[in-house]
């Protein structure tokens, strides 16, 4: 079977789906790998690097797509790319299936098997395939550095001959993978760090990293959803949450928001009025901008200045570190593909939790329940 590594079509995507190290692993397991000219250049990978591990060069995406059985991408395919795909082929990428419904329909109509890295179950067995976590880790780390480089003050406490410099105050909303890495990075830079999350269970992790956990007092774990994800909370909880965040955000120099609910628009946690209570020169890094953002004023892939507060809506922060981001993503996608393979062939076991959980279209049908409901509602 032929695996394709195309050049990513989105202008802000610098990552490549499968760097040479992962290609070598696929070839070793019986696959033939073709790559498009220049697919790795934005990740500092040359065509010669791919050739050196046994991959074959294809000069244009049209030929690449039409000849390949399996396509590995970072971003979801466009409608134009789907038109080029070979009928009954398989595509694996980050794919927000309940949001990219036109693309889901196009894959279904063309009898293409769609597998999304967004849908990989978060189980112990699937850890090495968890691309959401590997990329979120980078986003949490880099977001702190991006904010610190723009801040008009030091991050750490400094004792100088001219006097004492107070440390920066950082508020992190959401203690998932990105949030925990942001905590660790901000603490290493010497900042005072506070963390809010609707899930009380993360308190121990937060405090183990040296940050202060702030929480809404509640008799139930109403913010805890399936698989450890956050879920929507009651209106009363939301009101108390907003007041708590407001009290702390007004004292913060950097705010990093990471709150996402799978398959839904990001919850608005920072309204305009809250931004206006912040100190001039403060910075909000909104890591939920891809799904609309946690701040009311966030604009995807833009930086907004409001009342002398900067709101950064960069949606692809992992893409600012393309070498390691590609390396990690390549390991994730390769681990998933090889898990579903046998003797250099794709061997899809629909009774397997990881295989069936990651798949959303198969043999002309939508197999992912939430995606099916969203598609039926649209039609």
Image (tube, rainbow, N blue to C red):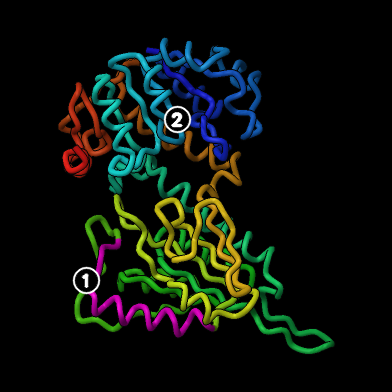
Local SS, label 1: loop
- Is 245 one of the magenta-colored residues? yes
Residue at image x 51%, y 75%?
275
Q: Quadrant of residue 236?
A: bottom left
**Which residue is most to the front?**
379
Q: Dividing the image into 4 quarters, which one contains the C terminus?
A: top left
Check the image and report above or below for 36 versus 92. Answer: above
Residue 73: mark in rendering:
2
| Location of residue 299 in the rendering, given as x and y in whole percent from the top left corner | 50, 56
Out of 323 and 25, give the one closest to the viewer: 323
Residue at image x 35%, y 63%?
267
Check the image and report above or below for 12 versus 51. Answer: below
| Location of residue 260 in the rendering, given as x and y in whole percent from the top left corner | 36, 58
| Location of residue 189 in the rendering, given as x and y in whole percent from the top left corner | 64, 69
Residues in magenta, as a range: 230-250
- Is 282 one of the magenta-colored residues? no
**Which residue is most to the bottom?**
163
Apparent side of residue 7 relative to residue 132 in the rendered image (left or right):
right
Q: Dividing the image into 4 quarters, which one contains the N terminus?
A: top left
């Amino acid at each position: 079977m032929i695996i394709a590594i195309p050049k990513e079509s989105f202008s802000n995507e610098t990552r490549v789906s499968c760097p040479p190290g992962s290609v070598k692993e696929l070839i070793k397991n019986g696959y033939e790998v073709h790559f498009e000219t220049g697919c790795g250049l934005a990740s500092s990978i040359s065509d010669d690097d791919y050739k050196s591990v046994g991959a074959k060069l294809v000069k244009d995406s049209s030929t690449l797509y039409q000849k390949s059985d399996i396509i590995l991408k970072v971003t979801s395919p466009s409608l134009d790319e789907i038109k080029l795909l070979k009928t009954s082929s398989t595509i694996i990428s980050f794919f927000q299936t309940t949001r990219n419904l036109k693309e889901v329909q196009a894959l279904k109509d063309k009898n293409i098997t769609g597998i999304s890295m967004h849908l990989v179950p978060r189980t112990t067995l699937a850890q090495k395939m968890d691309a959401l976590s590997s990329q979120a880790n980078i986003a949490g780390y880099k977001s702190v550095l991006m904010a610190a480089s723009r801040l008009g003050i030091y991050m750490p406490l400094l004792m100088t001959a001219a006097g004492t410099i107070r440390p920066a105050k950082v508020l992190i909303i959401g203690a998932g993978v990105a949030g925990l890495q942001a905590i660790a990075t901000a603490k290493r830079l010497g900042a005072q760090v506070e963390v809010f999350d609707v899930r009380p269970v993360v308190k121990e992790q937060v405090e183990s990293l040296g940050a202060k956990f702030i929480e809404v007092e509640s008799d139930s774990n109403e913010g805890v959803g399936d698989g450890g994800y956050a879920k929507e909370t009651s209106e009363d909880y939301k009101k108390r949450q907003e007041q708590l965040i407001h009290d702390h955000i007004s004292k913060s120099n950097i705010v990093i928001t990471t709150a996402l609910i799978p398959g839904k628009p990001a919850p608005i946690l920072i309204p305009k009025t809250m931004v206006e209570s912040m100190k001039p020169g403060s910075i909000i890094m909104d890591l939920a901008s891809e799904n609309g953002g946690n701040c009311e004023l966030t604009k995807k892939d833009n930086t907004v200045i409001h009342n002398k507060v900067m709101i950064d809506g960069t949606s692809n922060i992992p893409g600012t570190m393309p070498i390691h981001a590609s390396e990690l993503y390549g390991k994730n996608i390769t681990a998933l593909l090889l898990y579903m393979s046998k003797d250099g062939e794709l061997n899809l076991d629909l009774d397997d939790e990881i295989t069936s959980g990651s798949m959303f279209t198969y043999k002309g049908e939508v197999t992912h329940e939430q995606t099916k409901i969203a598609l039926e509602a649209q039609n």
